[in-house]
């Protein structure tokens, strides 16, 4: 059955790329249960399609990538056993979990507010590009809460002091500051520039053999959490596997013959 997303999510395929966009602009692309579930299904569709090799995740409207969880919906459940903030009830973050677990690379294209669960969703992506007008925050502390990926993964993507500033003050930082500390990889002056930057990165990745791209991503993201010696052992396993692929043979042959490689994905 073909993937049929609800109106709150846009999904398109083009030239080996998957374009996923949060489509609740009037609600600043706040993540409710429907959108979270649809995002998880979109990532499953992206992962299962052999013709898709990279995804670009964005938000519609130009005001926000995502301002966070849908507080209006959330308050309906606060104080009940279905409170979505409880660890066992986080149905609304299913999309973020799927993004984090994806084997194929995902680029976040951020324009506007990127707050709370929205910032954490961007954290789950592999590469981030943003407009200079964008702002980033994990304001959960202001509501007497503890952020999830904002406290766990953000310190792995920027200096510890910067992550603590965000987590303890709850105040936003500019896109320029996010770029300076390494959280954002590219900046654009306009929304068009942002997508141009995302496409440029995606095209550079698409030029490489998909299996090697996926294994490189896996080795980097797992290895960064291992002691260096164990990370080396972990890498060797995948290195030996990739050497056995036809693409590894083709890569060496194309280099020797001074011609563009033809990847077979096997």
Image (cartoon, grey):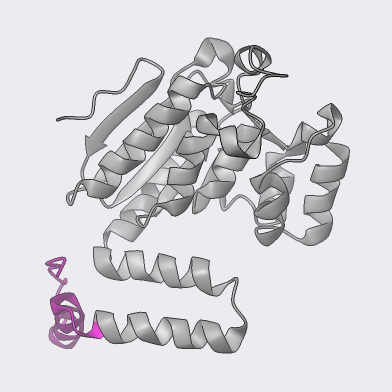
Residue farthest toward the right in the current orientation of the protein: 169
Q: How many marks?
A: 0
The residue depicted at 54 percent of the width and 10 percent of the height is 26
**Which quarter of the picture shows residue 10?**
top left
Q: Is residue 121 visible?
A: yes
Residue 225 position in % (x across, y down): 60, 71
Compared to residue 146, the image places residue 111 above or below, namely above
Nearer to me, 60 or 243: 243
Q: Is residue 209 visible?
A: no
The residue depicted at 34 percent of the width and 80 percent of the height is 238
Left or right of residue 172, residue 115 in this image:
left
Residue 108 position in % (x across, y down): 49, 42
Compared to residue 94, the image places residue 246 above or below, namely below
Compared to residue 47, the image places residue 45 above or below, namely above
The residue depicted at 72 percent of the width and 41 percent of the height is 147
The residue depicted at 58 percent of the width and 72 percent of the height is 224
Residue farthest toward the front in the current orientation of the protein: 81
Q: Quadrant of the N terminus?
A: top left
Left or right of residue 215, residue 250 in this image:
left
Compared to residue 61, the image places residue 251 above or below, namely below
Magenta stretch holds residue 234: no
Left or right of residue 129, residue 11 in this image:
left
Residue 223 position in % (x across, y down): 53, 74
**Which quarter of the picture shows residue 266?**
bottom left
Magenta region: which residues? 243-266
Nearer to me, 195 or 114: 114
């Amino acid at each position: 059955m073909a993937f049929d997303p609800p109106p709150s999510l846009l999904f398109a395929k083009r030239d080996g790329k998957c374009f996923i966009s949060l489509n609740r602009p009037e609600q600043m692309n706040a993540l409710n249960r429907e959108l979270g579930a649809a995002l998880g299904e979109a990532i499953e569709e992206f992962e299962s399609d052999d013709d898709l090799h990279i995804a670009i995740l964005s938000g519609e409207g130009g005001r926000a990538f995502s301002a966070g969880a849908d507080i209006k919906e959330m308050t309906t459940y606060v104080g009940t056993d279905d409170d979505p903030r409880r660890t066992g009830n986080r149905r609304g973050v299913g999309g973020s979990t799927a993004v984090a677990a994806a084997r194929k690379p995902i680029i976040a294209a951020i324009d506007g507010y990127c707050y709370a669960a929205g910032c954490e969703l961007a954290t789950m992506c592999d590469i981030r590009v943003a407009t200079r007008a964008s702002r980033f925050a994990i304001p959960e502390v202001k509501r007497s809460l503890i952020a999830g990926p904002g406290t766990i993964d953000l310190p792995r993507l920027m200096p510890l002091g910067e992550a603590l500033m965000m987590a303890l003050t709850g105040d936003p930082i500019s896109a320029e500051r996010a770029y300076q500390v390494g959280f954002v990889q590219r900046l654009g002056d306009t929304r068009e520039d942002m997508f141009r930057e995302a496409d440029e990165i995606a095209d550079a990745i698409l030029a490489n053999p998909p299996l090697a791209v996926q294994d490189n991503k896996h080795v980097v993201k797992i290895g960064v959490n291992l002691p260096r010696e164990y990370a080396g052992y972990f890498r060797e396993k995948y290195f030996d596997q990739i050497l056995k692929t036809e693409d590894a043979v083709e890569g060496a042959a194309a280099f020797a013959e001074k011609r563009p490689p033809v990847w077979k994905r096997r």
